[in-house]
Image: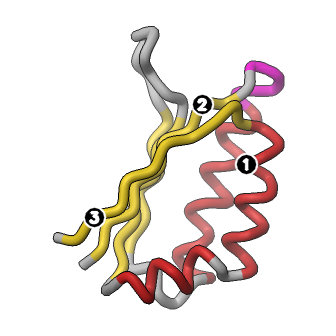
Amino acid sequence: MVKHIVIFDFKDENKTENLYKAKIMLEALLDAVPTLRSIEVGLNFSNEERAMDLSIITAFDDKEGLNLYANHPEHLEVVAFLKTVVNGSKVVDYIV
C-alpha cells in the first residue's frame, strides 16, 4: 500500500471559505478516482507558528495507482484550484 500525504499553507484572503471548498473538492475525489482507496482531509486547529492549514492522507494499492490519481482529470481540477489559494505545500509518499 502507498500513502500520499500533503499539507497546505493557505493564503489569508478568503481563507475559511477556501479551506472548506478545498475539503469538499478533495473528499469528492474518493468517488471520482478509481485507484484512490481512502482519503482523510483535516482542517488545522493548532495555533503554533509552524502549523499548516489543511492536510490530506490518501491511500493507494501501489505507485501506479498514485500516478493515475495524480493525472486524473478530477484531481487536476482540484490542483488547479489549490494553486490559486495556497502559498505552498509539502508532500511525503511512502510504502507501508
Q: Quadrant of the C terminus?
A: bottom left
Q: What's under tag 1, amino acid-wise?
A: Leu
Is the stretch drawn in magenta largely helix, strand or loop? loop
Task: Report which residue position mark 2 lands on.
Answer: 9
Q: Residue 94's mark?
A: 3
- Residue 75 image position (x, y, % from top left): 67, 71
Is 15 one of the magenta-colored residues?
A: yes
Q: Nearer the viewer, mark 2 or mark 3?
A: 3
- In-image side of 83 versus 43 (left or right): right
**Do the numbered discs 2 and 3 sit on residues whose CB atoms are within 8 Å?**
no
Q: Residue 82's mark?
A: 1
- Residue 44 image position (x, y, % from top left): 46, 29
Q: Residues within 10 Å of mark 1 (few under 14, many from 20)?
A: many
Q: CA distance from mark 2 to mark 3?
A: 22 Å
Which secondary structure, mark 2?
strand
- Residue 84 image position (x, y, % from top left): 83, 43
